[in-house]
Amino acid sequence: MFNTLSGRFLILTTLFVMLAEILIFVPSVARFRADYLQDRLERAQIASLALLADDMIAPELEAELLENAEVYNVVLRRDEMRELMLSSTPPGAVTHDFDLRDASAMTLIRDAMMRLFNTEPEVIRIIGDPVREGGLVIEVTMWTAKLRAAMIDYGLNILLLSAVISVITALLLFLAVQRLIVRPIKGVVGNMKAYAADPEDARRIISPDTNVTELREAELTLRSLQTDLTGALRQKERLAQLGGAVARISHDLRNVLTTAQLFADRMEGSNDPMVKRVVPKLLNSISRAVSLCENTLAFGKAEEPAPSLGWVNLADLAGDIFDSERLSAGEHDLSFAEDIPMGLTLRADPEQLYRVLSNLVRNARQAIVASGKPGEIALQAFETDADWQIRVVDTGPGLPKNAREHLFQPFAGTNRKGGSGLGMAIAAELVRGHGGTLDLERTDEDGTAFLVTLPKSIEE
């Protein structure tokens, strides 16, 4: 029970209510003492009325009056005269004087606590105002034993009542917490267990039904999480199936490309100037296609092979990319520009860097062609002491909002009809494999800019 939420709540509620009652107990006992002493003053004043009615009373009657008032002496000040009205011999000398006329709350609390913890009975003098204007001041002396006993009885009754109130309050709160909080939490936990048993079953997704605001927010958040997870698991299954299909296709496609490569090799012996100029680029394209097919299985495993680093002439690489994209652009009014320092070389995997930049340039070309307007694609590069930076800038229409939100997520970062949404995810993964970053610098109606940053050294 002590390890449950409701059990701990029950204990804490009992303790807090008891603490509140204790805070009430101290001033309550102080008020009881003040009322007790005031009552003795009133009794003493009433007893002194017998003497005012008859100047001489029998000693036996005087002793009885004092005993009923529980005091030893009664002094009444009337008309500026202090008169001993009733008197008997106290068991000892007066040790303390207490004036109730102008006593503050803190003074009453202090005097009450001192009396409660002082176990030795004493003779004290009490000073107060007479009731019904029966004089100016009334003083009595009394024994503290009965006062302390009465305070202890009153305190025990208060503590007992506090305990009963605490237990009843705690039980009521316990039942309320069980119904309003614990039961809905158990329902959420039960749903989580059921969902964990088969997270691909959409019927197990929680349906929020509580009216408690905080718990409803938790249920809504859990439902969103479960919905996303179920969708991700289904996508993962489709990706696994797609990976198997692509692996089989790539095997046959590689054979086809190998045959095409053999024919291209034979074409190198042609004397046609156009053939001589085109064949090297054709061979490079076929080699890259073969390499891509061989790496398909690695992508199906959600990972790319580690880059094989070497020194790459960026201007030559950019030329190959632009030549290929010019052919794809056809007659569209599209220009390509290079802003690369002469002789700039960087350390990277040439095939993987080609795939990254080719993806960026191809996406830019497709966006500009789809817009039907003229445009330009520029590839800029510069280096610092720490890294190489390559920027691909276009004057296209910019990326739509939904494509920006999921730009580097597989199957989610495309807005182009027929696009797979894999290009940017692959490019980002390849750059990360080099220890670098691929960032979207800007995108608006004036165009888009991507920045590839490749570090020169490996960070420890």
Image (cartoon, rainbow, N blue to C red):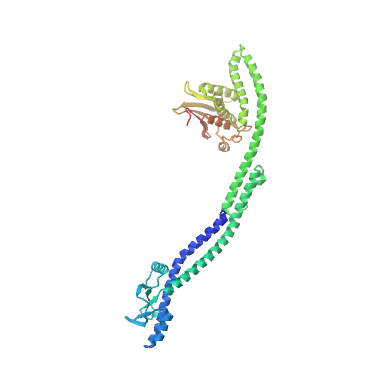
Q: In which quarter of the image is residue 373?
A: top right
- Quadrant of residue 40 within the rendered picture: bottom left
Is residue 211 something that shows in the picture? Answer: no
Task: Give whichever of 458, 358 is nearer the camera.
Answer: 458
Asked if residue 271 lies left or right of residue 86, the reply is right
Q: Is 270 situated above or below 99?
A: above
For the N terminus, the image quarter is bottom right
Residue 202: x and y, percent? 66, 44
Q: Residue at x 48, y 26 (%)?
A: 381
Residue at the (66%, 31%) spot, across then down: 244
* In the image, farthest residue toward the top: 271
Vertical position of residue 253 compared to residue 78: above or below:
above
Q: Nearer the viewer, residue 55 or 354?
A: 55
Among the 4 quarters of the image, the one containing residue 29: bottom left
Which x, y percent locates residue 188?
A: 61, 50
Residue 162 visible in the current orientation: yes
Viewer-closest of 137 and 362: 137
Q: Is residue 126 above or below residue 435?
A: below
Residue lying farthest left?
80
For the residue pair 265 and 59, the one nearer the viewer reads as 59
Left or right? Give the position of 145 relative to 202.
left
Q: Position of residue 2 (x, y in %)?
A: 56, 55
Name the residue rendered at 62%, 23% in the picture: 290
Residue 242 location (% of width, % of height)? 66, 32
Question: How many numbered marks does the figure carry?
Answer: 0
